[in-house]
Image: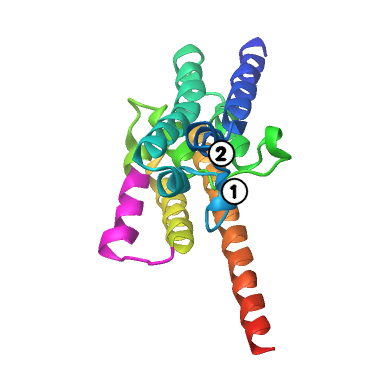
Amino acid sequence: MRTDLSYLFYILLGYLSGSILFGYEIPKIWKGIDIREDAEDGNPGTFNAFVCGGIGCGIFTLLADLLKGIIPVAMCRNKLGMASLWFMFVMAAPVLGHAFSVFHHYHGGKAIAVSFGVLIGLLPFYRPLLLLIICYLLFSLLLPIKSHAKRSMIAYLCFAAVSLFWVKEKAVLYGILFICAVVVYKHYMAQTAKERQEESRRKWRME
């Protein structure tokens, strides 16, 4: 029981670190801009940090978003291991924090970069990271999908499906499924909101 409860520290660490939206904070400090107002979709993420803040701002945001996934997961893996089912929550915590930030009234980003960070934190257990990279490349290069939101949703759904057969460690598998559910949900909600806005604009123009 003591070992299982010790996972709670890393879950809390992961959620709080994930809740720091570097995609909002770094452009605000670096360029003095509010990315939620300047970006087309208002998402405080790495992609918009590159678009609105430039290469330097984007790189720092990317590194910060990766690290907030890497650090709590790698620390927990090294200290406690991945055998306990509590580890699935350690994996999911940074992604949940980024998607539903406690510091931003439970609003947040789409959690792509931080989810990659979580999988990097599993190294040298490389299979989940490799699978996600392959899924993204598949729908970006071989079977390209123009819509970023749809491409991400399909890539993560594919990642979840393939993981069912290729990832044998139960805690890691459940963590992957948890992460995929959060990422797909955030992209679905963003895509739905965008479609509603476009529909409202069309109606307004017709009137």
Magenta segment, which residues? 131-147
Between 135 and 67, the one nearer to me in the picture: 67
Reply yes or no: does residue 138 show up in magenta: yes
- Is the residue marked by circle 2 packed among few (<14), some (14-19), or many (20+) residues within 10 Å? many
Residue 136 percent coordinates (x, y): 35, 53
Residue 169 can be seen, yes or no: no
Left or right for 185, reference 74:
right
Alpha-carbon span between mark 1 and mark 2 = 7 Å
Name the disc covering residue 24, or none. 2
Confirm or deny contact between disc 1 and disc 2 (CB under 8 A).
Answer: yes
Left or right for 189, reference 147:
right
Which element type, helix, strand or loop, lies under badge 2? helix
In the picture of the structure, the residue carrying the numbered disc 1 is 36
Residue 164 percent coordinates (x, y): 45, 47
Q: Is residue 66 above or below residue 45?
A: above
Which quadrant holds residue 18? top right
Reply yes or no: does residue 135 show up in magenta: yes
Between 188 and 160, the one nearer to me in the picture: 188
- Is the residue marked by circle 1 packed among few (<14), some (14-19), or many (20+) residues within 10 Å? some
**Residue shown at the point (45%, 29%) measured from the top left:** 64
